[in-house]
Image (cartoon, rainbow, N blue to C red):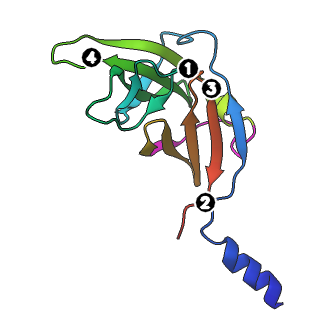
């Protein structure tokens, strides 16, 4: 009797993962009949010259910055379910430099939920950014952490928040 209670107490508040990897759809936005219901921009991150395409959340003052970037996440309502659009945006280093979309990824709500307990995203709410490439959403009673990979794929896992 003591062992199950002890194991339960050890697991309370710890992250448990139901993890899946989702690839973006090959097309940008499937139809013009969409509605962006929420839009958020993440923190800046940096790409340095001479670095092999690694991203850095912070940089030293003497670093040779190649690009300043951020992700923009949109919750898109299509008929009765949500999808997620993620754009990687380059912002110039100097005032007045152009801002441009470097890449755009679109994820169907069905694909996001494929290996999770939900069937599709129907009541998704953006909660917060956890890092420049990681954000948290809530779908009904589940908290879902999404990690954006450099190739545009998402690592998605259901997490239990500490109580």
- The answer to whether 121 is drawn above or below residue 72 in the figure is below
Q: Mark 3 and mark 1: span between their CA atoms?
A: 10 Å
- The answer to whether 89 is drawn above or below residue 70 in the figure is above
For the residue pair 79 and 8, the one nearer the viewer reads as: 8
For the residue pair 21 and 144, the one nearer the viewer reads as: 21
Q: Mark 2 and mark 1: span between their CA atoms?
A: 26 Å
Q: Indicate which disc residue 153 carries.
A: 3
Q: Mark 3 and mark 2: span between their CA atoms?
A: 23 Å
Q: Would you say residue 120 sits in the magenta stretch?
A: yes
Provide the residue span drawn in magenta. Answer: 115-128
Mark sitting earlier along the chain (2/1): 1
Quarter holding residue 152: top right
Q: Indicate which disc residue 106 carries.
A: 1
Secondary structure of residue under mark 4:
loop
Q: Indicate which disc residue 160 carries.
A: 2
Quarter holding residue 27: top right
Mark sitting earlier along the chain (4/3): 4
Which numbered mark, 3 or 1, is in the foreground of this view? 3
Provide residue 38's location: percent of width, then percent of height: 39, 33
Mark sitting earlier along the chain (1/4): 4
Provide residue 24's location: percent of width, then percent of height: 62, 20
Secondary structure of residue under mark 3:
loop
Is there a contact, CB below 8 Å, between mark 4 and mark 3? Answer: no
Is there a contact, CB below 8 Å, between mark 1 and mark 4? Answer: no
Q: Mark 4 and mark 2: span between their CA atoms?
A: 38 Å
Residue at image point 25% right, 10% down: 98
Q: Indicate which disc residue 92 carries.
A: 4
Q: Mark 4 and mark 3: span between their CA atoms?
A: 25 Å
């Amino acid at each position: 009797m003591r062992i199950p209670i002890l194991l339960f107490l050890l697991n309370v508040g710890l992250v448990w993962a139901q993890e899946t990897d989702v690839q973006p759809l090959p097309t940008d936005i499937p139809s013009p009949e969409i509605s962006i219901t929420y839009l958020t921009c993440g923190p800046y991150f940096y790409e340095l010259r001479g670095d092999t395409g690694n991203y850095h959340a912070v940089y030293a003052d003497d670093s040779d910055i190649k690009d300043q970037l951020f992700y923009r996440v949109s919750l898109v309502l299509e008929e009765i379910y949500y999808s997620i659009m993620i754009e990687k945006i380059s912002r110039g280093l100097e005032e007045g430099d152009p801002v441009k979309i470097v890449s755009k990824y679109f994820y169907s709500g069905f694909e996001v939920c494929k290996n999770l307990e939900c069937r599709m995203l129907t009541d998704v709410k953006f909660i917060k950014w956890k890092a420049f490439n990681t954000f948290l959403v809530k779908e009904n009673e589940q908290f879902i952490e999404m990690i954006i990979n450099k190739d545009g794929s998402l690592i998605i896992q259901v997490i239990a928040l500490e109580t």
